[in-house]
Amino acid sequence: MLESEKSATTLHQVTTSNETATICSKCGEKILNVMTADENRVYHPHCFNCSDCGKTLAGGFFYKSKNNKPDPTLRNSLIEPIRFCEDCYKKIAPKCARCQNIIEASSIVWEDKKFHESCFTCCGVDKNGVECRKPMKDESVYPLKDKWYCKNCFDQLNTGISAASRDILGEKCHKCYREFAPGSLVSEYKGDYYHPTCLVCFQCHSSIANKSFYHQAKSDDRQSDAKFLCENCHIKNAQECAECKNKIVSGEAIGFEGKQYHRSCFICQNCKNEIGTAHFFKSKDGKYICQNCSYQQQDSQMK
């Protein structure tokens, strides 16, 4: 399963001279007007797209995962990250081995499978057909034939097998470096494991285990320097749209000349259509004009 992180990119106006040119890292062609950047590389907006559906990711939020295989079709055989739009990421996000629903952040790991805390319960059934469903958090796990039991239910199976308890995960917490108790709840992020009380928001220090959160890494992306923000703190820190003055919390955003816009606010001043990642022009009075309206203005001036 790919370990992914949520990221965002913005659009920038290209300024080049006759002697220098900005080259797209994917197709190798010149970028004449608008570009987007990620990991110190620049792209045409239409070249920076989802690895699954091909939708452009320029100017919006996306998920990316490390890719260890170079693509020979890319310029200089660069190793490009695997990128997904939000809809496609939901298709590959980790799922609970019991209920098959998506696991957002916190999970219990057992036998290389992931579970919601509420789903990792004893599989024992008594003689009346009543399920035990005892939560296995902080409990010893007794496995048998792809099922798992608490000690009481396992003893009632009369298997004749003396099974030792199995730890759910033999790893140490990435923050406190203490071992996990058998059956304890584990939060996982990018291959590292945390106690739920250790995986907290950098700003308000509330637990973000089993909740949506945002990751802020330093420039070299060292995991030890990673900062996590809960949704509330992310909203507080989110930038304002330069047009409507509301916070840009999620969805696609457009960045231009140091300002951020909701995609729906970054529109042509003539036709009022969204400009998005298409070519556009800036008028002398600072208004943004789409390419079609700009050509129409030029034609009318020539008549």
Image (cartoon, rainbow, N blue to C red):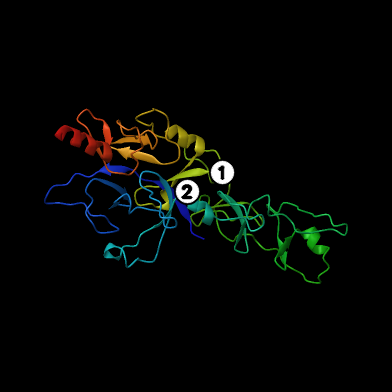
275 or 67: which is nearer to us? 275
Badge nearest the viewer, 1 or 2? 2
User: The residue tagged with tag 2: helix, strand or loop?
Assistant: helix
| Viewer-proximal residue among 302 and 136 | 302
10 Å neighbourhood of mark 2: few (<14), some, or many (≥20)?
some
In terms of depth relative to the viewer, which is nearer, 219 or 60? 60
Name the residue furthest right.
Answer: 128
> What residue sits 52% from the left and 42% below the top?
200
Image position of 88 with respect to 273: above or below: below
Instruction: Say left or right for 76 vs 20.
Output: right
Name the residue carrying label 2.
Answer: 86
Q: Quadrant of the C terminus?
A: top left
Mark 1 or 2, nearer chain start: 2
- The residue under label 1 is which amino acid type? Lys
Q: What residue appears at the point 60 percent right and 52 percent down from the top-left corner?
A: 107
Instruction: Answer few, some or many: residues within 10 Å of disc 1's Cα (few below 14, many 20 plus, some between 14 and 19).
Output: few
Residue drawn at (88%, 57%) of the image? 128
- Residue 211's label in the rendered image is 1
Q: Is residue 114 left or right of residue 28?
A: right
Looking at the picture, how far across and down is residue 261, in whole percent? 36, 35
On the question of residue 204 being in view, the answer is: no
> Whole-percent x and y of residue 30?
21, 54
Q: Is residue 130 left or right of residue 284?
A: right
Q: Considering depth in this image, is 231 or 73 the residue closer to the camera?
A: 73
**Farthest bottom residue in view:** 160
Q: Position of residue 123 (x, y in %)?
A: 75, 59
Residue 198 visible, this angle:
yes
